[in-house]
Image: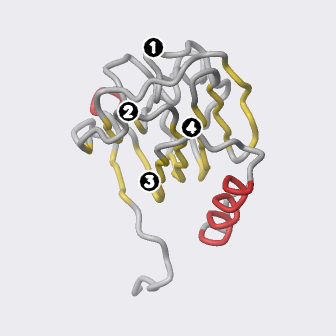
Amino acid sequence: MTPSRYLPQVFRFNGSGTQELQVTPFLSGTSGATLYCVFTVSSTNNYNLVRTRNLDDYWRFSNDYNGYFGTFLSSRINGYPANMPSSGSHLVSIHSNSTSYEVLLDNNSKGIQSVAYDAGDRFRIVTNDKAFNGDLSLLLVYPSYIDKTSNTHQSVINAIKNNYPSLAI
């Protein structure tokens, strides 16, 4: 079968724990950031998709299936967000500023946390110590806070819906 030229390209990770992508840190001096990530996870109980500081953080942890997010933070939030997926295609967005931190899963809020943004000292995708088995289809990072009720957020969500119509958003 020949792939369609209309199918989105993906980074495919096999869960080996040797496929980490390192990007030069680029958020220094910012007061907030927003991240949008479209991914498909294949029966993975432990994984991390983006790390901005040397924390023992998880986007999903196998002991309780919650996240232990540390992206854009100086320390991770234990048990947040609840019930992160181990399979299927999803959109996660992280909205962080000086007073609040919020993760949306498939454009549904997982609750607002009262913690401050930290730009971090690294930008790693699919960290080796938390191997990921699946596809990373889209990663957008804005060097500013985007409120989930804003027109900008809605425009991003609409563009993602148009390019990934199978997502439940």
The circle drawn on residue 136 is 3
Cα distance in 3D space between marks 1 and 2 = 18 Å
Q: Earlier in the sequence, mark 2 or mark 3?
A: 2
Task: Measure the alpha-carbon separation of dots 2 and 3.
Answer: 27 Å
Alpha carbon distance from label 4 to label 3: 14 Å
The residue tagged with tag 2: helix, strand or loop? loop
> What label does residue 29 carry, if any?
2
| Residue at the spot 45% in from the left edge and 13% down from the top edge | 75
- Closer to the eye: label 4 or 3: 3
Q: Secondary structure at mark 1?
A: loop
At label 2, which amino acid type do we have?
Gly
- Residue found 36% across the figure and 26% down from its top: 120
Q: Given the image, on which type of amino acid does mark 3 rest?
A: Leu
Using the rendered view, name the quadrant where residue 47 is placed: top left
> Circle 3 sits in a helix, a strand or a loop, which is it?
strand
Residue 34 position within the rendered picture, expressed as x and y whole percent measured from the top left: 54, 42
- Counting residues from the start of the chain, the first of labels 4 and 3 encountered is 4
